[in-house]
Image: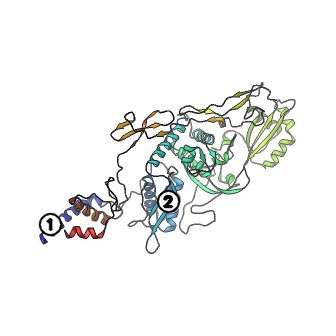
């Protein structure tokens, strides 16, 4: 018996010698590695005192959520962060990685015995398994459909504006299960402010435009009421940042640009930006935090580029703007907005005459932030032509019904046959192609190889040539957290193999997915060594 135990001990020693070199780097993470995309918050973490530990936690969270891990290590070895630092890092990942739509924000933290550090978290995901796999395919398809509408000759500004405008057309402001994430906006076409901002950021990242999500409080221009809100800080050149609020720019038939590439000073008139770690109750973190961008540049502001930001005005200049823009134009006022509207109403006859409008006419104005849309209407719209509604298909765009005035020098669009509701944003009638609705159909026509199958569209039955799913068991990717536990588990699995038992991970899950889950028990460990 003694001889047998000696042989077993020698075998264990040999196994230790073999695995130690392979495991010696298990605790380290290359925190100096720059991500493929620029992430604002991650870069800012580098400037803080405990940066190595903060980056260790940040990268583990991002990688863990991406792999849908059941546990994510936050502190380990020399990388230790406090509960407050953890909250900051988690918020940083959330602001940076809006593509991780399946992370619902709920988690169970596990702290050290004295409560001074967070050791690991157990996330709660909105989707997992096949549901998540299919959702990620649909998500990528939705992004690609948007990007296909861009052209290679577009500038960064033009790409940003095009993606901004397309999302405004596609998304309806409405609550729903995924309204607070990018999936709801891009795939389902339904979102609230958070979903708008996160979808825009996903698209901007794909074309090389930097963006970070901003949270805060604002006065809704549609209701005049204050509410928690989300928007974006973006950079086209990697140096200067601008603020974009797509949600409040999207005013149905009117697409506004009042909140497109604005400065912090202008945005601050009806937006209050929360600092990192701050919440709706004004509570802040008790740790060192980094700053969010302060936006002072104006070169890429929409109204400056379009030459429609005005400080002074007269009848002749406003008449020219109206005439050059088919008698409907938006301007951004540096002066008092209500004073301008009052002046416009009092001088509209002079303005109309200078613009060449004679006879009876109607006029009006609309206000979004500091943007004012003014219009003159000298046509009776007696000749309206209906454009019939056309449903979108998987590949082709459609449109809602609308009416075009055929009277000379008019050409305005309306949402109704009475010409009472003018369509200012002509893109709003578009119904973008839905893209394929991929489904799991398993037969010889969809088989790629083995147990791998191409997705099939449940609407038009087209078989994908790029997206597929697998029925083969996925590789176990549990976080093996402790080097000594890994060594111990390696030895334990060696003995399990002698008895024909399946290999078990350090987390207790059987790695052979066809077997049941077996928890490691100290009793069995003693039994093996007693053999």
Furthest toward the left, the residue is 3
Q: Is residue 442 left or right of residue 144?
A: left
39 relative position to 476: left or right: right
Instruction: Kindly report which numbered mark, 1 or 2, lies closer to the viewer in this rendering.
Output: 1
| Camera-side residue of 167 and 185 | 185
Image vertical order of residue 297 relative to residue 282, above or below: above
Binning the other alpha carbons within 10 Å of mark 1 as few (below 14), some (14 to 19) or many (20 upward) gives few
Identify the disc placed on residue 7.
1
For the residue pair 323 and 170, the one nearer the viewer reads as 170
Q: Please name the residue shown 46% across and 40% down the image.
A: 439
Q: Secondary structure at mark 1?
A: helix
- x and y percentages locating residue 419 in the rendered image: 77, 33
Locate the C terminus by quadrant. Answer: bottom left
> What residue did someone put label 2 on?
45
Give the quarter of the image for residue 275: bottom right
Residue at 24% across, 63% down:
491
**What residue is drawn where x is 87% and y is 31%?**
360
Mark toward the start of the polypeptide (1 vs 2): 1
Residue 195 coordinates in the image, percent (x, y): 58, 50
* Horizontal and vertical percent position of residue 276: 57, 61
């Amino acid at each position: 018996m003694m001889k047998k135990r000696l042989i077993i001990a020698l075998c264990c020693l040999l196994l230790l010698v073999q695995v130690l070199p392979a495991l010696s780097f298990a605790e380290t993470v290359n925190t100096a590695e720059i991500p493929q995309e620029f992430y604002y918050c991650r870069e800012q973490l580098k400037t803080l005192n405990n940066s190595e530990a903060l980056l260790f936690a940040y990268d583990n969270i991002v990688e863990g959520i991406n792999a849908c891990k059941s546990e994510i290590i936050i502190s380990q070895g020399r990388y230790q962060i406090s509960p407050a630092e953890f909250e900051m890092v988690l918020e940083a990942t959330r602001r940076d990685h809006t593509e991780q739509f399946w992370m619902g924000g709920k988690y169970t933290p596990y702290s050290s015995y004295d409560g001074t550090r967070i050791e690991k978290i157990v996330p709660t995901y909105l989707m997992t398994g096949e549901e998540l796999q299919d959702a990620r395919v649909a998500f990528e398809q939705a992004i690609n459909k948007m990007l296909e509408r861009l052209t290679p000759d577009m500038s960064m500004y033009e790409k940003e504006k095009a993606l901004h405008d397309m999302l405004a057309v596609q998304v309806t402001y409405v609550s729903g299960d995924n309204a607070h994430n990018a999936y709801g906006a891009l795939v389902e076409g339904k979102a609230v402010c958070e979903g708008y901002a996160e979808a825009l950021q996903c698209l901007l990242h794909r074309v090389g435009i930097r963006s970070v999500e901003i949270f805060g409080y604002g006065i809704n221009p549609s209701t005049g009421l204050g509410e928690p809100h989300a928007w974006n800080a973006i950079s086209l050149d990697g140096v200067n940042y601008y603020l974009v609020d797509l949600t409040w720019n999207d005013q149905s038939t009117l697409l506004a640009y009042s909140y497109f590439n604005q400065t912090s000073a202008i945005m601050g008139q009806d937006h209050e930006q929360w600092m990192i770690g701050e919440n709706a109750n004004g509570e802040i973190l008790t740790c060192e935090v980094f700053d969010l961008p302060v936006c002072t540049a104006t070169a890429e502001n929409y109204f400056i580029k379009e030459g429609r930001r005005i400080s002074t005005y007269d009848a002749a200049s406003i008449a020219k703007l109206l005439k050059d823009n088919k008698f409907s134009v938006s301007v951004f006022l540096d002066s008092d907005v209500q004073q301008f509207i009052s002046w416009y109403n009092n001088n509209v006859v002079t303005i109309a005459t200078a613009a060449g409008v004679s006879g009876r006419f109607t006029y009006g104005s609309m206000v979004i932030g500091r943007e004012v849309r003014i219009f003159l209407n000298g046509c009776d719209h007696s000749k309206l032509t209906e454009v019939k509604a056309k449903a979108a298909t998987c590949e082709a765009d459609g449109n809602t019904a609308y009416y075009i005035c055929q009277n000379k020098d008019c050409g305005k669009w309306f949402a109704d046959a009475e010409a009472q509701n003018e369509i200012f944003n002509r893109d709003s009638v578009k119904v973008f192609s839905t893209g394929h609705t991929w489904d799991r159909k398993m037969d010889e026509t969809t088989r790629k190889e083995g147990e791998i199958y191409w997705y099939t569209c449940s609407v038009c039955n087209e078989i994908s040539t790029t997206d597929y799913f697998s029925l083969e068991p996925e590789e176990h990717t549990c976080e093996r957290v402790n080097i000594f536990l890994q060594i111990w588990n390696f030895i334990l699995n060696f003995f399990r193999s002698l008895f024909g038992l399946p290999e078990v991970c350090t987390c207790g899950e059987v790695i052979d997915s066809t077997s049941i889950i077996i928890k490691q028990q100290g009793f069995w460990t003693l039994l093996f060594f007693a053999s």
